[in-house]
Structure formats: C-alpha cells, structure tokens
Image (spheres, rainbow, N blue to C red):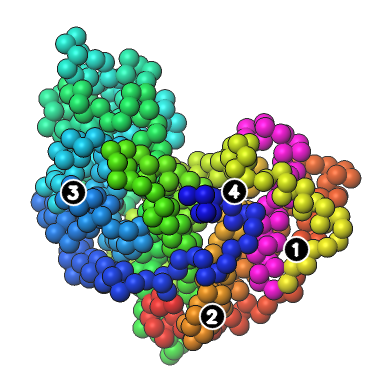
C-alpha cells in the first residue's frame, strides 16, 4: 500500500500519464461487460420504460432478476456467496451503463450497491451466507435505511432506537426512516439505529419482520419507476446475530459505504450524460430550421461540444479513480474473516477523490440534460421526448449519497485532517510555492503548466485561509466550498490532460487528437474560473497590503496565452455530430 499514491496527493506532485487508468485501457473482458450491460439496458429496460414509469406490477422485480442472471447485481460479491467478484473497473463500467436506465438505475444501484455492500464489507460469514446469494440473484431485494425525517446530512443525529430485549436474544427497534429506495419491495433492510439511544449501530433487518411497515409511495419529480417510501419500526425484533459489524460503530459502515456509493453515482452520471448527448446530437442532426440541420448553427455546435467536453473530463476522472481503487484492492489481502473491513479501509484512502467525482459528475449530468432540453427546444419540454424524463431524473443526483454541499465541505476538511496527521506536506507545499513566487522562478507553459497553476492556486488560497483562521477554517463553509471547487477543477484538468497525453503517446490517431482538443478547451476555459473564485476567496480572507500582495501573486500564477477555444469547439462539435453520439 505504501507504494500507491495517497488520496489527494495529486495536489502535491506530478503524475505520469502512463500511470493512470483510462477507458482506452479496457481489456477484452471489460469491453464484453460493457456490451453485455449496455445491450441489456437498451433491449430489456429502455424498451419498457413507459411501463416502468407507470409502476407496472412485478416489472421492476422481473428486470432485477434479469440483471441478476447476467451477474450485474453480484459484481462486487465474492463467488463464495454467489457473486461474480469482478474488478473495480468492471463494476465501474456496469454503473456507467446502468446510468442510461432511468429509475431502474436507482433500483439496481440500491440492490447491488448500498443494499448489499454493507454485508459484503462488514458482514460475518454467516450473514453473508444467509443474505448475499439472494441479493445477487434478486430473489431478495435490498434497501438501505439511513435517512430520517430529522436526520439527513446529519446522519448521526438519528432518533431510531435499538434496545436489547430482557432475554438478550433481540434488539427492539423503534423509529422511522424516510426516502428509502426499494422500500416498497425490499426483503432485506440495512438499518441504522442507536442502541440505548446513543450507540449508533447498523443492523440487518428482514422485510417481513413483525412491526415493520412502509408508508405510501412518494410522488417524486423524477425516477418515478423506483420505489421510495418511509419505513416504520414499531417494536421490531431483530435477532442479535443480525447486528452488523460492531456496537457503536455504525458510522464506520455508513461512511465507507457512502464512499463507494459516491464514486458509483459519478459513473452512473457519465452513462446518463452520454445518453443525453446522444439524444441531443441525433435531434440536432434531424431537426431543420431555415432549410439546414440545427447542428450546423454555431450556438448549437457550442452546446454539443461543451456537453462532450464535460463528459470527457468526468469520464477521465471516474476511470482514473477506478484505477486507483483497483490498484488498492490488488495490494490488499482480503482473504481473512475481516477482508471486507480491509477493503473498506483501502477504499477510504480515496474518499476525497470519490467526493470530487460525485460533485463534478452529477453537476456535469445536470448541465448535459439541461442543454439537451434546450437543443430540443419546445419538444424538450414534452414528455413524448426522452430528454424530458432525463432532465427530471437527473435532479436527484446532486442530493443522493450526501448532497454536493456536504461533499464540498468534506474535500478540504479531509485534506486538513490528513495534513494534521502528517499524510500530506500541505504546509511545506504552501511555503515552497510562496518561495517560488517571491523568487520569480515560476515557469508555467502550455496546458501542463496550467494544470500546475490550478494546483498552485489552490495552495495559495488554502494558505491564506490557514493564515487567517488556522484550525477554525473548518467553520467557514463559504471558504471551504470555494477551496473544494479549486481542488475539484485541478483534479479534473489534470485527469483530462493526462488521459489526452497517454492517448497521444499510445495511439496518436484522430481520437487522440479529439481528446487533446477537449482537454485543451476545458483547461483554458477553466483557468479563468479558478482565478475569479480565488480572487473572491482571497478578498474574504485578507485586506489592505496583504490582499494586494495575494492578488499580485495570483496574477503571476495565471499568466498564460489563451487558445482559440471557439475553433476547437467547432472541431469537437463536428466529430460529435458525425457520430451522432459521444464517441471519443
């Protein structure tokens, strides 16, 4: 593990393009999994989307079982317990392809992800043997019950109680959970409750337990085909052997599962965003105004290009992170009884990257579906067109798995916490940068230089925050949010550029040129945003001569010659229109 890059370390050093994983590195097996999953979604789910949205009786279970037959529900489950035990790139591919499936993506994600992964990672052998085979086949449907009416982002303030019965055989659960995916059909719930009112603990609860009931289906803006209900526990008896992991350590289960959930949600966002671009490009090619396809109009070209660029950047981030997770898993010995916990700790190393992927990916999706509607014009507002459903379905992604606001807070606070433990040379990096600026020794040329400038802007701004507030910086959310955006965009810029460089070195064909164009446009158009955000933040952190000095330093970091991004976008749009979809 020591030879692997630490989570967040990209901010403090250079990365060799050949060391990152990209979609161009898919093996034949990965490509087969992609074709199989995408084919299942296209042939079996999208063809029945109207029935699914109208909640046709039994359909969702039928589709889940069909996914189980293909091994999609058990991709993360070991073969010993009826799963496929795939590598992390394969499970990322599945999550991406499932993204096209609308509300089914939430149902299947709840089944294969947060509904089963707590048992995969933290369950005993007996618990795994009892529950995982059924979850893999969808003979049993899983659900994850964490959120409560008064406990959303602040999950540890949950009120649901668990009290040991007088005979010591059961925990008696009382409380209510809210917005629980798959609740209307779940056979197995992962439930969080406080033993004796204070020890936050996870439990496996059978759906047919006496005293367990569900509320009415929520009437949602989107993902209408998925089941979302409240779950009520009234003196529900849970056998003591169904306590998951350890008493008082439910937060370890919850937060580690969320790390993986956030990453997979980013992958799902990539799949859905690609679908939105495909719909928009096809419509723009077919729709004529003034006698020509609207795909030929400059402002439509810009929209198609920008959608593709943001998807390319997100895809680069997601598979780079997937590679980090896979390398981590390869370095660990997970063969023992505590193998799941070992794996969870390994994934936790990249919690920061998981949050960055979640924020960037879901906001890219929001952008893609919004522009997709705009390209469709009035038809985009009609439910007869698929893009209207995608627009509604996408909105929840920025709320799921920890809101984007919560994830933004987590990014800089995680960095600060790890720096305090000595995991990062944060203060040293800040001081080194200050010295280089003072000495006038900074040389930032081309896109690689701008990527480094993005990291430097983050360090400069973080340094000013620490100078003003010290440890109390964690109390200032507006500053933390901007620091998060600086870090996210630095990771996004670097991921896009490294992938383009790797493709150029390994291939050099037209697709490599397209990747390079996309990376260049994103990097050049993002530096200005970083500069503005940093100016705004520094002005909130300093004044007078100190502020003037900081702004002067910032200006030195952002000196660069801009490229003709309008022309580059035209080339990108032409490639997208020719293919009628995202084909990078």
Q: Which residue is drawn at 48% across and 69% down?
A: 312
Q: Which residue is drawn at 36% across and 61% down?
A: 89
Question: Residue 258 at x, y = what percent?
Answer: 39, 43
Single out the mark in the foreground, 2 or 3: 3
Residue 545, magenta (yes or no): no
Q: Which sits earlier in the primary sequence, circle 4 or circle 1?
A: 4
Farthest residue, direction right:
545
Seen in the picture, residue 232 relative to 546 is either above or below; the reply is: above
Marks 3/4: CA distance?
41 Å
Marks 4/1: CA distance?
19 Å
Farthest residue, direction bottom:
291
Q: Which sits earlier in the primary sequence, circle 2 or circle 1?
A: 2
Query: Which mark is drawn over residue 484?
Result: 4
Is the C-beta separation of discs 1 and 3 under 8 Å?
no
Per the image, label 1 sits on a secondary structure element best described as loop
| Residue 38 visible, this angle | no
- In this picture, residue 244 sits left or right of residue 513: left
* Quadrant in which residue 554 is drawn: bottom right
* Quadrant in which residue 50 is drawn: bottom left
Query: Which mark is drawn over residue 504?
Result: 2
Marks 2/4: CA distance?
30 Å
Q: Which sits earlier in the primary sequence, circle 2 or circle 4?
A: 4
Single out the mark in the foreground, 2 or 4: 2
Residue at numbered disc 1: 558
Magenta stretch, residue numbers: 446-475
């Amino acid at each position: 593990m020591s030879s692997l890059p630490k989570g967040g370390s990209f901010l403090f050093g250079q990365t060799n393009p050949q060391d990152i994983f990209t979609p161009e590195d898919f093996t034949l097996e990965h490509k087969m999994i992609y074709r199989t999953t995408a084919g299942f979604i296209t042939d079996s789910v999208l063809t029945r989307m109207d029935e699914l949205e109208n909640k046709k009786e039994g359909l969702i279970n039928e589709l889940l079982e069909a996914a189980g037959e293909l091994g999609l529900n058990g991709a993360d489950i070991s073969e010993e317990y009826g799963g496929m035990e795939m590598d992390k790139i394969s499970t990322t591919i599945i999550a991406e392809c499932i993204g096209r499936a609308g509300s089914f993506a939430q149902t299947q994600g709840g089944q294969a992800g947060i509904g089963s992964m707590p048992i995969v990672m933290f369950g005993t052998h007996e618990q795994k043997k009892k529950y995982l085979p059924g979850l893999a086949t969808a003979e049993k449907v899983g659900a994850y019950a964490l959120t409560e009416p008064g406990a959303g982002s602040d999950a540890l303030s949950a009120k649901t109680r668990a009290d040991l019965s007088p005979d010591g055989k059961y925990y008696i659960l009382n409380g209510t959970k809210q917005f629980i995916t798959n609740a209307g059909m779940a056979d197995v719930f992962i439930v969080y409750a406080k033993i004796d009112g204070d020890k936050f603990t996870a439990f496996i609860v059978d759906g047919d337990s006496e005293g367990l009931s569900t509320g009415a289906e929520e009437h949602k803006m989107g993902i209408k085909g998925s089941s979302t209900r409240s779950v009520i526990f009234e003196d529900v008896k849970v056998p003591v052997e169904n306590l998951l992991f350890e008493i008082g350590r439910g937060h370890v289960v919850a937060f580690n599962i969320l790390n993986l959930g956030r990453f997979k949600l980013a992958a799902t966002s990539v799949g859905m965003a690609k679908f939105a671009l495909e719909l928009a490009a096809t419509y723009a090619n077919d729709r004529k105004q003034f006698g020509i396809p609207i795909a030929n109009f400059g402002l439509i070209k810009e929209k198609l290009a920008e959608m593709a660029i943001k998807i390319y950047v997100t895809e680069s981030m997601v598979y780079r992170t997937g590679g980090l997770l896979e390398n981590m898993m390869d370095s660990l010995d997970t063969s023992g009884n505590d193998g799941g916990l070992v794996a969870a700790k390994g994934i936790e190393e990249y919690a920061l990257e998981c949050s960055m992927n979640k924020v960037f990916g879901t906001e890219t999706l929001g952008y893609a579906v919004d522009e997709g509607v705009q390209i469709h014009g009035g038809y985009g507002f009609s439910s007869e067109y698929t893009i209207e459903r995608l627009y509604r379905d996408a909105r929840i992604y920025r709320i799921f798995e920890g809101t984007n606001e919560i994830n933004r807070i987590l990014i800089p606070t995680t960095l600060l916490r790890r720096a305090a433990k000595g995991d990062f040379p944060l203060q040293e990096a800040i001081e080194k940068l200050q010295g280089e600026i003072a000495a006038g020794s900074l040389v930032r040329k081309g896109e690689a230089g701008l990527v480094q400038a993005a990291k430097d802007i983050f360090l400069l701004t973080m340094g000013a925050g620490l100078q003003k507030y010290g440890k109390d910086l964690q109390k200032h959310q507006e500053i933390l949010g901007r620091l998060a955006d600086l870090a996210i965009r630095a990771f996004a810029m670097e991921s896009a550029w490294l992938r383009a460089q790797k493709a150029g070195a390994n291939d050099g064909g037209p697709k490599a040129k397209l990747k390079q164009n996309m990376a260049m446009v994103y990097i050049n158009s993002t530096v200005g945003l970083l500069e503005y955000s940093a100016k705004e933040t520094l002005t909130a952190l300093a004044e007078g001569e100190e502020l003037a000095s900081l702004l002067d330093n910032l200006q030195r970091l952002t000196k660069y010659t801009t490229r003709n991004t309008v022309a580059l976008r035209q080339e990108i749009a032409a490639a997208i229109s020719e293919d009628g979809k995202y084909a990078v």
